[in-house]
Amino acid sequence: MAIWTLLVLASLLAQREQLNRNASALARIDAVANLKKDMAIRKWASGVGGVFIREEHVPSQNSLEEEERFTVKPGTDEQFRIVSVTPIHLLLAIQETSNRGFGHKERLTSNQLRNIGNRPDEWESQALAALSQGAEMVTETQPKKGSHGLMRAMLPMKMEEECLECHRDTLVPVGGLRGGASVSIDLNTYRTAQEPTWRALQYWHGGIWTFGAATILLLHFFSRRRALERLYQDEMRRENEMAFGAMAEGAVITDAEGTILWVNDAFCTIFGFRRDEVIGQNPRILKSGLHDQDFYRQLWHNLTQNGHWRGEIWNRRKNGEIFPEEISMQALRGPDGRIRRYISIFSDITQRKKAEQELADYREHLEELVRQRTEELTVARDQAEAANRSKSTFLANMSHELRTPLNAVIGFSRLMEKDSSLSSRQQGNLEIINHSGHHLLTLINDILELSKIESGKMEIAIEEVALAELLTQVVDMMGLRAEQAGLTLRLEMENLPAVVMLDPVIIRQILLNLLSNAVKFTPQGEIVVRAEAVATGDNRVDLSIAVRDSGIGIAPADCERIFSSFEQVGSNQHGGTGLGLTISRNYVHMLGGELAVESAPGHGSTFHFTIPAQRVDTPQLPARPPEIARKLPVDRRCRVLIVDDGQAARLLVRSLLEPLGFTIDEAANLAEAATALSKTPADLVFLDWYLPDGQGIDFITRLRRDSIDQPRIVMLTANALLEAREAALAAGADDFVSKPFEEGDIFRAIEQQLGICLSSPGNENPPPSDIQEFSRLSPETRKRLTEAAISLSATEIEAALSQVASENPRFAEHLSALCRDRHYQTLWKTLGILDNEQ
C-alpha cells in the first residue's frame, strides 16, 4: 500500500512538474514572441525613418524634448501637435504600454549606456555576456517571492546601418552587439490557467489511488484468505495425519487407480507390513482369497456409484494369517467430479467374531436351558392346574359330601323346632344340634369363600346401599349373640351419607366376621361399631368403619399373623377355621382399602378399615315390602318334582312343601325323573347335581333340547362353588340353591319361578289381638312406630318401642321380638303398613 501511494504521489508530482515546465515554456514562447514583435516594429520604424505621433502620446523621454514638433490641422477644425519619434522611442513607447496593460516588463539594455535607466541588472549582464559570445537568445526562469516565478528572456540588438545615425558614438560596428531587448513575464497567469488541469490530475490520481488501494486490499484479502486456507488445510492435513496415525483403526489412502499412497501405524500393526513395503503397492496384496470376483465387483460398483461402501471382509496378514475386518471405504472426488482418492478405515474384529460365536453358542445353550425350563414349567403348570382342578374337585366333593348330610341335620332340626310337644331338655338338645350344624356350615362356607378369592373368581356387585340401614341390620343380627354372651353391642354413626355405591353383601360379610370374632374373644364388656365418612371431592367419600372390643387383646407379634389363612392366636377353645380375618382382609382389598388391627394383650382390639365410595344424591325408590305370604288356594295345587338320590333330602323338601298344598313327586335318579315327567308334567323341578346315573346339568340340557313341556328347574345341590352355579345357569337351569338351605331359600325360589307367594315362619298373619293392641295406642305413638318400622332404623325403632312400652309394655316386648327376629312382614301387617300401600 505504501509503495502504491508513493507511486501515485510521484506520478502526481511529475505531472505537476510537467505543468510547471509547460507554463515556463509557454511564458518563454510569449516572451520571445513579444521581443521579436518589438524588434520587428523597431526595424519597420527604422526603415521608414521614424514616425509622427500626437504630442500628448509622446512617452516621457528626456531625449524627445529636443525633437521637432509641428502643429497640424486635419480636415476637422481640431488642431493638435505632432512630434517626430525615432524608432527607439517608438519601441520604448510600445514597451511602456505593454508593461502597463499586460503585466510584462520589457525594456532595452546595453553595456554602452546612453540612458542610466537602462543599466542592466545582474541577470541582464549575464545574458548580454552570453549574447556577446554568439547566443541567439537567452531565457531563464527565476524565482520570485510571493509568486510562481518569472520568465526572463533577452534577444540581441545588432548594429544596423539605420542605427548608425543615432548610435555611431558607441563605436559598435554594423552587425555587432549593440545591446539587448529584455522581457520579464510573471508565471502566475500561466499557473492559474493550469489550475483546472491540476485539479483534474489530482482527482484522477485520487481515484486511481483509491481504485488501486481497493484492488490491493482485495488482493491482500483474497491472498490472505488463500494463505489462511492453505495454512488451515496444511494444519488439517497434519492433524488428520496425526489422527489417522494415532487411531486404533487402520487407515489406508489410495489413488484413483488403487495404488497405496499412505497408511497409518495401526495398518502396519494389524497387517504386519512396514510402511515402505506397502506404499506404491496395490491392495490386492492383502486379499485372503475367500471372496469371489462377484463380491469385489459389487464392492467397487457400490463404491464408485454411491461413493461409499461398508461391510465385513476377510484379508490376509503378512504372515499369511487370514482374519476378519470391518471396513468403511469412501471415494473422494475432485472439483470436476472425478474420483481422486479412496480412503479406507478398518478394524480387526477377530475378537468380536470370537465373542459373537461364544454368544451364539451361549445363546444356543440358554435356548436349550429355556426350552428345558419351559418344559419343566409346562409340566409344573400342568401339575398346578391338575392340582387346582383336584382342589376344585376336592372342594366340590367335600362340599357335596358334607352339605348333603348337613342339609338333613339342619333342615329336620328346624322342622323339629316347630313341634310343641318336645320337652325343654329335648329343645336344648335340638338347639345344640342346630347350632353345631350352622357352625359346621360356616366352616365349609369360609373354605369355599377363600377358594373363590384366591382363584380370582370373586366378583364385586356395586349397588346403591343405605349405609345406616345396612349397619343397623348387621348390628341387629349380632345383637342376640352379644346379648347371650352378656356383652353390650353399640352402633355409632357420624356424617354418613344416606346412600352410597358399595357391595352390600361384602360389607355385611366383613362386619359379621369382625363382630363374630369380637363376640368370641370378649369375655365381658362391650363391643362398639363406629362408622364415619369424610368427603374427598367429586361426590366421593372415604368410609371408615371400626369394630372395637374390650376383649383379651392380641400380642403385637401376632397382629399380622392373624390375617394369614388357617391361623389362630391363643388356645383353640373358641373354635373356627382361622379364615374369617383372611377373607375379610381380601374383601377390603377388593374394595380398595386395607384392614388393620390395633391391640394389646388385656386391652381389647380395634379392627378398622377405610374404603372409597361414591355418594348417591338421588337414590332410587326402595322396593315395596313383599306381599303377605299366603297358602296356595285349593284350586291351585302346583306339582313339584324332587330329584335327589338322598332320601333325607327329598323328605325334607316334601315336609316343607306338602303342608302348603303342593303336590310332590320324587325321583332318586335321572331315569325315574324322566319317567315321572313323561307321565305327569311338573310345574317345578328341584334337581340335585350328582345322581347315580349322571349329572343334573346333563339332564337339564337334554330336557331343554328334547322336551315339549318345559318346567321351571331349580338346582338344589350341595355343590356350592361359583363354577357350579354358572354352569347350571348356562345349561338352562332357572335358579340355584345350595345345600344346606334355609326354608326361606326354598320359598324364595318357588315365589320367583312360579309367581306365587308362600307363608314362611316368622311372617305369618298376625293375630287379631295384635292389631287391636296397636289400635289402642295413642295416635302419636302409632305414627312414630309406623315411620320407624318403614325406615328399619334400629335407633328409631328402639325409640319408638320405648314410647310404646310406656303405654303397653307387653305389646312393646312382643314387637321387639319381631324386630329382633327380623319378622318384618308380620310387623308391617300388624301396623297396617302393607294394607295401606296395596
Image (spheres, rainbow, N blue to C red):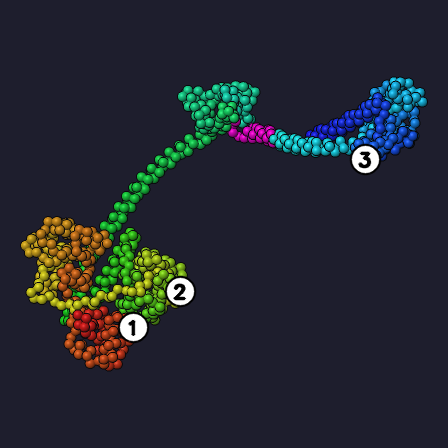
> Would you say 500 lies left or right of 18 here?
left
Who comes first in sequence, dot 2 or dot 3? 3
Q: Residues within 10 Å of mark 2 (few under 14, many from 20)?
A: some
> Element type at marker 3?
loop
Indicate which disc residue 795 carries: 1
Who comes first in sequence, dot 3 or dot 1? 3
Contact between marks 3 and 1 (CB within 8 A): the answer is no
Is residue 421 visible in the rendered structure shown here? yes
Residue 464: image location, x then y, percent? 28, 62
Q: To which residue does mark 3 refer?
A: 77
Residues at marks 1 and 2, CA–CA distance in whole angstroms = 32 Å
Q: Is residue 98 magenta?
A: no
Contact between marks 1 and 2 (CB within 8 A): the answer is no
Residue 139 vs residue 685, the one in the foreground: 139
Secondary structure that dominates the magenta span: helix
Q: Nearer the viewer, mark 2 or mark 3?
A: 3
Q: Nearer the viewer, mark 1 or mark 2?
A: 1
Residue, x 53% and y 30% (percent of image)? Answer: 248
Residue 49: image location, x then y, percent? 86, 23
> Element type at marker 2?
loop
Residue 70 vs residue 834, the one in the foreground: 70
Residue, x 40% and y 64% (percent of image)? Answer: 600
Q: To which residue does mark 2 refer?
A: 600
Residues at marks 3 and 1, CA–CA distance in whole angstroms = 173 Å
Query: Amino acid under label 2?
Result: Ala
> Element type at marker 1?
helix
Who comes first in sequence, dot 1 or dot 2? 2
Residues at marks 2 and 3, CA–CA distance in whole angstroms = 173 Å
Query: Height in image: 814 above or below 60?
Result: below
What range of the chain is rendered magenta?
A: 225-252
Residue 454: image location, x then y, percent? 30, 53
Indicate which disc residue 554 carries: none
